[in-house]
DNA sequence: CCTATATATCAACTATTGTTGAAGCGTAGA
DNA sequence: TCTACGCTTCAACAATAGTTGATATATAGG
């Protein structure tokens, strides 16, 4: 991930409605949620949601697939991961014993194992 | 961390100059960097940098201390950690075996151990 | 106490971003 | 093929954020 992508991703997350969308999708898991459900969850007009979904998609934070009349959105876990990596890269000039917060970040997800999703 | 703080933090990181400041400080480690050095590193006027530093400080992403004539800024590792935690909280509805990206995020920092910095 | 250095604040301007309503496309079922 | 539904696109407006230059505060040294 380069700076331009990271900027797009952080800017995308720095907006109330978009952050709620991403959190809803992260919670929902790989099955995702339909655009209509998201509009209700977040509480905005569908026309406005569309704008934000495009923004998030562009930033690589969500993906979409059509399913009948609905469009289903889901979190792009690899994109989220890359973003955190970008932020923490080169931390403490190669003395990571002081940059433990990433450990805490991991703990929040309670992920015991796994290696399939990250590109 | 609540939504308001997370929004402030992500919005802060979604700006070219502020993202560069944070990355420079994350790289620098706990010793931090003087405002003047940051202005040169990032390539903006000091008056403009001040504005961005206030924004980052407000968002809980950096801290500052005075040292002689200079003001030294450093990354708030706990704040960064909280932010990632907020984003990943409740992921996959309690089925974390699918949300492994946080593992990758951790790997980026190569932190073997540590528990002192996170509040 | 005066000057130089380092950083912060303020007010004005400019640029960017978010919201809304109207209209358009794709899919499903009658 | 006609109608209904779900979602997206477009153009206009409203709101917010970033930059700049002038001015102010704090510290250190002469």
Image: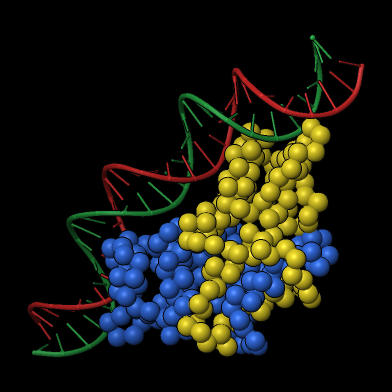
Chain colours: A yellow, B blue, C red, D green
Q: Write the residue at 68% across / 65% down.
A: A118
Q: Quadrant of residue B8?
A: bottom right
Vertical comparison of B4 with B72: above or below: above
Question: What residue is rendered at 34% in x and 78% in y?
Answer: B34
User: Is B53 in front, or is C11?
Assistant: B53
User: Whole-percent x and y of residue D21?
Assistant: 19, 55
- Residue at the image point whose x is 62% and y is 47% from the top: A57
Instruction: Name above or below for residue A35 compared with residue A90.
Output: above
On the question of residue B63 being in view, the answer is: no
Q: Is residue B5 left or right of residue A22?
A: left
**Relative side of B117 to B48, left or right:** right
Position of A21 relative to D25 (above/below): above
- In this view of the protein, which residue sits in the foreground, A73 or B32? A73
Q: Residue at x 58, y 55 (%)?
A: A13
Whole-percent x, y for residue D12 in the image: 46, 25
Splitting the image into 4 quarters, where does residue C18 fall?
top right
Can you tell which quarter of the image residue B87 is in?
Answer: bottom right
């Amino acid at each position: 991930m380069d700076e331009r992508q990271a900027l797009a991703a952080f800017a995308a997350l720095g907006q109330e409605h978009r952050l709620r969308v991403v959190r809803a999708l992260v919670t929902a898991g790989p099955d995702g949620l339909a655009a209509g459900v998201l509009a209700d969850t977040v509480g905005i007009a569908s026309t406005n949601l569309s704008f934000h979904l495009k923004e998030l998609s562009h930033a690589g934070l969500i993906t979409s697939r059509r399913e009948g009349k609905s469009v289903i959105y889901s979190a792009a876990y690899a994109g989220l991961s890359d973003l955190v990596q970008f932020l923490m890269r080169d931390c403490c000039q190669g003395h990571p014993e002081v940059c433990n917060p990433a450990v805490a970040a991991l703990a929040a997800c309670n992920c015991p194992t796994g290696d399939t999703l990250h590109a």
